Each structure stands twice: as C-alpha cells, then as structure tokens.
Image (cartoon, helix red, strand yellow):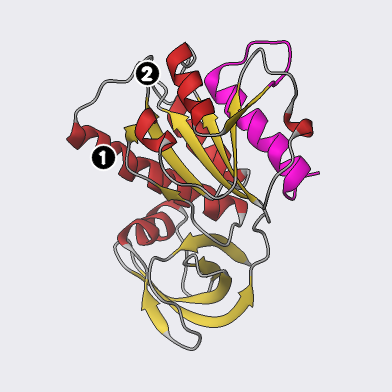
C-alpha cells in the first residue's frame, strides 16, 4: 500500500536509490513509522510522479529505490500569479496553502499602505521560507506536478510596475462586472488581493494605470483570505480546470 507522497528537491531517475531529505525522513520514520518495503510516491516539480519503495528506514535516515515514472496531469491550463498583501497571524499561511491547492502557479507577498504586518528583512525572509514549505506541503497533499514559487516580499507599487503578458485583475466593490465578464488574452492572469482594510484610493488608481481590471465579487464584503480564494476558484472555473 502506498503510504505517502513526498517532495524531493533533486533530480529523480528510475532504478536508482536515493536518500530522502531530513524533513521527509523525519515524517516517514518518526511520524508515520514507515517500514522497509512500503511504497511511496515522489515528485520534484518536473511534471512527473515517481513510484518508489523504501529500502532502508531509521528515525534519522530513509532511503528509497525509484521503480517507475509517470506523467502528472494535474496542472491547470490557467497560469495564475497571485499578488497577496500580507495578512496577520496564520491567515497568510492559510491563503498560501489553499491557493496552491486551487492551482496558482506563483505567489508574491506584498506590502501596501494598510498592511498590518511589520517585520524586519530577516524575519520576512524566514516567513518566505516558511510559506515555501507550506506550498510544498500543499502540493504533496493535492497531487500537483509543479511547486509554485513564493517570491520575496516586495512593495505593492513595485509589483504593479513589473512587466506581465496577460490579464491583470483587481477586486473592487464598485466594479461594473464580475469575473464571468472577463476575456483573457491568453492563459495567463495576475490577481491582486489587498489587505484587511482594503487598498487605498491611490493604490487602486495606480493598479488601473498598470492595466489591472476592476472586478466585482458580489454584494457582500469578504475578508482578504475569503476574497482571494473565492476569486481563484472562479478564475479556475471559467478559465482553468475546476467545475
């Protein structure tokens, strides 16, 4: 019986034995109490899943023999880049995890005027490392073929000014149409989600200058994590692979 799906950050080849990472070894050896001979699934973000059999298991080291390779076809045709203003507490962790499960391909954490999170550069870097691990865990759970990149934290205005060849979307309570009214120029989109207090008028206007389209999510006011995940779901439903 296959007991787990594990991310391995290195090249994988069939008919070879590898030592799994310290985190994976701890999870298999100490948490799951895996035994030699049990089967697992490995992936490294190259678009394939690799079947493997555990060959040596201890509490500190786990080795596996790679036995096969199959193409993973779980990725959405929509390439969706989420620009999320950092939220407080574990809300950002939740947003990262669920947006990866829903199929986003890239995430950029943003600082805006009303962002309530104030951390120095060192702590921000540690946060990005933590969010990348959360993204990997979400891929292990959801069966994704590729691991979305969590970009370094940047200022909102700097992110708006980056070049992008696709449709840019910003949620706005007074927009004239919803996501169903969008027409994507290709299968690439950027989604901007503001902080709990919303974007300032200047930031909204700046986003429009950089060709972000205002989109209405409905008559109710949604929290930042609810708004983002709802918008991702609708974008995947209309232009991706949900529904």
Relative to 157, say whether 31 is above or below: below
Instruction: Residue at 51%, 70% (x, y): give it.
Output: 46
For numbered disc 1, what is the local secondary structure?
helix
From the viewer's perspective, tell me whether residue 214 is left or right of residue 115: right
Of all residues shown, which one is farthest toward the front? 209
Residue placed most toward the observer, 172 or 25: 172
- Camera sees residue 200: no
Residue picked out by circle 1: 126
Cα distance in 3D space between marks 2 and 1: 18 Å
From the viewer's perspective, tell me whether residue 130 is left or right of residue 176: left
Q: How far from the left and from the top, in percent, is residue 19?
A: 35, 74
Q: Which residues are magenta?
A: 216-243
Of all residues shown, which one is farthest toward the right? 243
Relative to 107, say whether 12 is above or below: below
Asked whether residue 198 is drawn in magenta, I would say: no
Instruction: Residue at 47%, 55% (x, y): give it.
Output: 32
Instruction: Residue at 39%, 48% (x, y): give it.
Output: 133
- Within-10-Å neighbours for mark 1: few <14, some 14–19, many 20+: few
Where's the C terminus, which quadrant?
Answer: top right
Residue picked out by circle 2: 115
Where's the N terminus, which quadrant?
Answer: bottom right
Q: How far from the left and from the top, in percent, is residue 89?
A: 39, 22
């Amino acid at each position: 019986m296959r007991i787990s799906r594990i991310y391995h950050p290195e090249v994988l080849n069939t008919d070879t034995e590898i030592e799994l990472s310290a985190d994976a070894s701890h999870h298999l050896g100490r948490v799951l109490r895996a035994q030699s001979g049990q089967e697992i699934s490995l992936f490294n973000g190259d678009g394939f899943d690799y079947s493997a059999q555990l060959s040596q298991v201890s509490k500190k080291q786990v080795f596996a023999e790679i036995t096969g390779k199959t193409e993973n076809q779980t990725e959405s045709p929509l390439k969706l880049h989420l620009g999320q203003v950092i939220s407080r507490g574990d809300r950002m962790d939740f947003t990262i995890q669920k947006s990866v499960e829903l199929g986003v391909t890239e995430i950029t954490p943003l600082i805006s005027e009303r962002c309530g999170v104030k951390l120095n550069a060192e702590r921000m870097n540690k946060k990005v490392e933590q969010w990348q691990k959360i993204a990997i865990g979400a891929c292990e759970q959801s069966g994704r073929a590729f691991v979305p990149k969590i970009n370094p934290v940047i200022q909102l205005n700097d992110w708006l000014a980056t070049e992008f060849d696709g449709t840019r979307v910003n949620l706005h309570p007074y927009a004239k149409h919803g996501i169903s009214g969008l027409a994507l120029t290709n299968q690439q989109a950027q989604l901007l989600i503001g902080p709990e207090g919303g974007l300032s008028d200047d930031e909204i206007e700046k986003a429009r200058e950089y060709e972000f389209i205002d989109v209405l999510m409905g008559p109710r006011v949604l929290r930042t994590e609810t708004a983002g995940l709802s918008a991702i779901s609708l974008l995947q439903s209309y232009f991706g692979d949900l529904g």
